[in-house]
Amino acid sequence: MAKSDKFVAGLIAGAVVGAVAALLLTPKTGKENRKFIKDQANRLGDKASTGLGGIFGKKPDAEKEAEHTGNGTHTRHRS
Protein backbone atom coordinates (compact mmCIF):
# COMPACT_ATOMS: atom_id res chain seq x y z
CA MET A 1 0.00 0.00 0.00
CA ALA A 2 1.41 3.36 -1.02
CA LYS A 3 2.02 6.11 1.49
CA SER A 4 -0.82 8.25 0.09
CA ASP A 5 -3.23 5.30 0.23
CA LYS A 6 -2.44 4.80 3.92
CA PHE A 7 -2.98 8.50 4.55
CA VAL A 8 -6.40 8.47 2.83
CA ALA A 9 -7.43 5.31 4.71
CA GLY A 10 -6.39 6.91 8.00
CA LEU A 11 -8.22 10.10 7.13
CA ILE A 12 -11.44 8.21 6.37
CA ALA A 13 -11.12 6.06 9.51
CA GLY A 14 -10.55 9.17 11.62
CA ALA A 15 -13.58 10.88 10.13
CA VAL A 16 -15.77 7.86 10.86
CA VAL A 17 -14.51 7.56 14.44
CA GLY A 18 -15.03 11.29 14.97
CA ALA A 19 -18.57 11.16 13.58
CA VAL A 20 -19.51 8.20 15.79
CA ALA A 21 -18.03 9.92 18.86
CA ALA A 22 -19.93 13.11 18.07
CA LEU A 23 -23.20 11.20 17.77
CA LEU A 24 -22.65 9.31 21.02
CA LEU A 25 -21.68 12.41 22.99
CA THR A 26 -24.33 14.78 21.66
CA PRO A 27 -27.15 15.90 23.94
CA LYS A 28 -29.74 15.25 21.21
CA THR A 29 -32.13 12.30 21.35
CA GLY A 30 -31.74 9.34 19.04
CA LYS A 31 -34.76 10.46 17.05
CA GLU A 32 -33.25 13.92 16.51
CA ASN A 33 -29.90 12.39 15.50
CA ARG A 34 -31.53 10.06 12.98
CA LYS A 35 -33.47 12.98 11.46
CA PHE A 36 -30.29 15.07 11.27
CA ILE A 37 -28.35 12.22 9.61
CA LYS A 38 -31.18 11.59 7.16
CA ASP A 39 -31.42 15.29 6.26
CA GLN A 40 -27.65 15.60 5.79
CA ALA A 41 -27.51 12.44 3.67
CA ASN A 42 -30.32 13.78 1.47
CA ARG A 43 -28.54 17.14 1.07
CA LEU A 44 -25.29 15.42 0.18
CA GLY A 45 -27.11 13.16 -2.30
CA ASP A 46 -28.77 16.18 -3.92
CA LYS A 47 -25.44 17.99 -4.22
CA ALA A 48 -23.82 14.90 -5.72
CA SER A 49 -26.66 14.47 -8.21
CA THR A 50 -26.46 18.11 -9.21
CA GLY A 51 -22.70 17.97 -9.62
CA LEU A 52 -22.75 14.73 -11.56
CA GLY A 53 -25.67 15.94 -13.65
CA GLY A 54 -23.57 18.91 -14.70
CA ILE A 55 -20.69 16.64 -15.62
CA PHE A 56 -22.70 13.97 -17.38
CA GLY A 57 -25.12 16.50 -18.86
CA LYS A 58 -22.29 17.72 -21.07
CA LYS A 59 -21.47 14.26 -22.34
CA PRO A 60 -23.59 14.30 -25.52
CA ASP A 61 -22.03 17.60 -26.63
CA ALA A 62 -18.55 16.28 -25.91
CA GLU A 63 -19.32 13.11 -27.90
CA LYS A 64 -20.56 15.16 -30.84
CA GLU A 65 -17.52 17.42 -30.69
CA ALA A 66 -15.15 14.46 -30.50
CA GLU A 67 -16.93 12.76 -33.37
CA HIS A 68 -16.78 15.93 -35.44
CA THR A 69 -13.11 16.47 -34.62
CA GLY A 70 -12.35 12.81 -35.23
CA ASN A 71 -14.09 12.86 -38.60
CA GLY A 72 -12.18 15.95 -39.64
CA THR A 73 -8.87 14.39 -38.64
CA HIS A 74 -9.75 11.15 -40.33
CA THR A 75 -10.69 12.99 -43.53
CA ARG A 76 -7.47 15.01 -43.55
CA HIS A 77 -5.34 11.91 -43.25
CA ARG A 78 -7.11 10.25 -46.17
CA SER A 79 -6.41 13.15 -48.55
Image: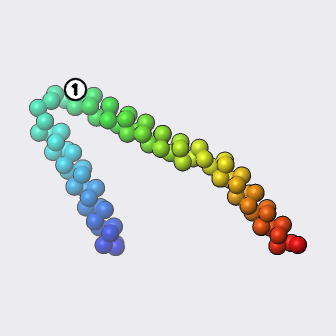
Q: Residue at the right extreme?
A: 79
Snapshot quadrant of residue 66: bottom right
Q: Quadrant of residue 35?
A: top left
Q: Position of residue 78 (x, y in %)?
A: 86, 72
Residue denoted by label 1? 31
The percent coordinates of residue 13 (x first, y second) are: 25, 56
Residue at x-position 74% and y-position 57%: 67
Indicate how the structure is coloured in the image: rainbow
75 displayed left or right of 65:
right
Instruction: Locate the C terminus and report the quarter of the image it occupies.
Output: bottom right
- Residue 30 lies, in percent from the top left, at 19, 29
Task: Classify residue 74 as left or right of residue 41.
Answer: right
On the picture, is 73 further left or further right than 21? right
Closer to the camera, 46 or 15? Answer: 46
Of 74 and 43, the residue lying toward us: 74
**Which residue corresponds to the image point at 82% horizontal and 73% vertical from the top-left?**
77
Task: Name the side, left or right, on which 36 lies relative to 68.
Answer: left
The kind of secondary structure element at disc 1 is helix
Quadrant where the image shows the N terminus: bottom left
Callout count: 1
Instruction: Tell me the crowding category of disc 1: few under 14, some 14 to 19, or many 20 or more residues within 10 angstroms, Cα based.
Output: few
Residue 43, given in percent of the width and then of the height, sits at: 37, 35
Name the amino acid, label 1.
Answer: Lys
